[in-house]
Amino acid sequence: MTKNLHISDDLTLPIEVVTMATGILGIRGSGKTNTAGVWAEELLKRGQQVIVIDPQNVWWGLKSSADGKHPGFPVIVFGGNHADVPLGGTEGKQIADFVVERRVPCIFSLRHLTLAAQRRFVTDFSQQLFFRKGEEQYQDPVLVFIDEAHKFVPQKVGPDMTHMVHAIQTLVAEGRASGIGVALIDQRAATVNKDVLTQVELMVVHRTVGPQDKKALDDWIKDNADVERRAEFMKSLAGLPLGRAWFWSVGWLDVFHQVQVRMRETFDSSRTPKPGEKRVTPRTLAEVNLDELREQLASTIEEAMANDPRELKKQVAALQRELQQAQSVQSRAKTTVEQVEVPVITDEQLQRFERCVADLRDLEVYVDNMREALKGAEDLRTFMLEGVRRLKAAKELPTARTETLPGGRTATSVPRSLNPPPRTSQNERTHIRAAATDLTISKTQQRILDALAWYESIGISEPSNLQIGAIALIDATGGHFSNTVGPLSSAGLLQRGGGTMRLTNEGRALASIPDRVATLNDYHDVLRRRILKVRHASPRTVDILNAVIARGGAEMTAEEIGREVGIDHMGGHFSNTIGPLGTLGLIERNRGVVRPTEILFPVGLS
Ligand SMILES: Nc1ncnc2c1ncn2[C@@H]1O[C@H](COP(=O)(O)OP(=O)(O)OP(=O)(O)O)[C@@H](O)[C@H]1O
Ligand SMILES: [Mg+2]
């Protein structure tokens, strides 16, 4: 088998298209799903991972041969009438973990879910896919097909859709480096989000007639095409027959071909039914191994089973059968009337019960208030610790200088004489290492040393404890932190200031820099990855972080953030989601205003 993908008799594409951003567009029934199916077949034949988001349930045919008599590709189908595993819609994150870790091809048939549930699933899945593919061992290529793309990246983005669109936009714009390609399939170029469509590197265009859709395509090509190609392309769009398409890529692929795409070799499950025709259902589908899946997703699948309409129907039918049997036995049995005493609840008991319910409601409100009060106390504590740190720092470092930065933030710079001495030579380090062997350095302690070294590398020689905690992933306000740091200080590996620390030569010799960070963007990427490892953090926490970062250092109200990420800022979910950002000292919250700290925008990085 050649390495190139066989699309038609006169067009092959390099396998590298797996990680490209592709658009497959054209009016209904023009052959888009078939073209995408051919693409998927070619990749699956070459052992590449393919993921399909399928809101119409038309992709499952990949599992059978064209005549339905032989197995096709062993792709796991989640949800729909041909499901290997039911899909409830809430398990996007866990399934993303599974597909990244096990590298299995899969199809998500979403038609049975409401649009809101489809969107929730796609959002959770896309966010988690992006984050998990950031791990080095999982960066093999994967192509994510998104059929009916306008449902997930619409041109008109409603307030409840921002995090979904952002998640897919991130996959398209930033996924390539971690092996993610995306193919957006849609009937109408005009209804797919322009910010996403402009990222497309390879455009496949089937028959297109609508003036707005033609305009959207013209917008895509006009900056890249010469006048003749552009005119030829635009003129031919309305007359393209079924299955015929333009393949157009600018840049390294440099393709400009109009070809008749071959018919797929697997079962044509998106076939347009003819009137009076009886649908053929394939007899043989490829076997898939579900053992690993069951093991990893046991509880998630159980939950989905419990809510799966097909399962529920089966259960209802079984119960009805049981009921009928019971009724027929009963009607055969002799009927006797017997009076039985049944204990009945008295009025007094009922009143007591109602009082209890009312008390419980009061208690619920009380607990909610307490939770809010505790949150306020926590903020106050952080604020006071920071105040104490600054006071002490001011005392100990009288020559420190405070500057006001754009956005009202302040930054303290330390005079050159306080900067760390130059790095030690290799010989010196070996010697220091030998001297320091008395202390066995734990993993957490190593992370603290590494975090200090990392701050040095970006020009911050004496970061605050909170800053160190943010990078070393330790809560810097707890007793655990000072117990961990104590031995490092006694062993002379670091020096503690008032709420700050700096490496000594000995400590520096034992530290390594955990992430290569050259710019503020790199640094924010590190934070995005790390925050997910903090207790109670979720991809939504990253959404909030992104919203704050996007303001470039200016403060925002909680209400604005809530609107941007689609979470009610008054609710407990919002507090829980934003909480980890406060714990790490990335933001300060005060009376509904969220302010980024210098930990989020460190001086020295831009
Ligand atoms: N290249 C082709 N050669 C021959 N027949 C084709 C080709 N492409 C599609 N067809 C036929 O047309 C039918 C409809 O194609 P397909 O489902 O790919 O259209 P679509 O553009 O995805 O439609 P929709 O917008 O409704 O999703 C296919 O089931 C197949 O029978
Ligand atoms: Mg289709």
Image (tube, grey):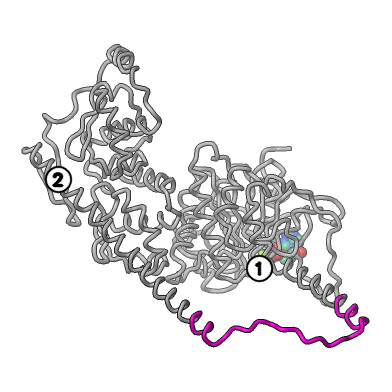
- The amino acid type of the residue labelled 1 equals Arg
> Which mark's residue is nearer the viewer, 2 or 1?
2
Quadrant position of residue 398: top left
Seen from the viewer's position, the closer of residues 318 and 552 is 318
Q: Earlier in the sequence, mark 2 or mark 1?
A: 1
- Magenta segment, which residues? 326-353
Looking at the image, which residue sits at the far left?
A: 398
- Residue underneath mark 2: 390
Residue at 90% across / 83% down in the picture? 331
Seen from the viewer's position, the closer of residues 267 and 216 is 267
Residue at 75% across / 71% down in the picture? 313
Residue at 21% across / 34% down in the picture? 461
Quadrant position of residue 138: top right
Give the distance between the C-alpha atoms of the residues marked 2 and 1, in whole angstroms.
57 Å
- Residue underneath mark 1: 111
Instruction: Residue 602 in the image: state x and y as whole percent.
Output: 25, 44
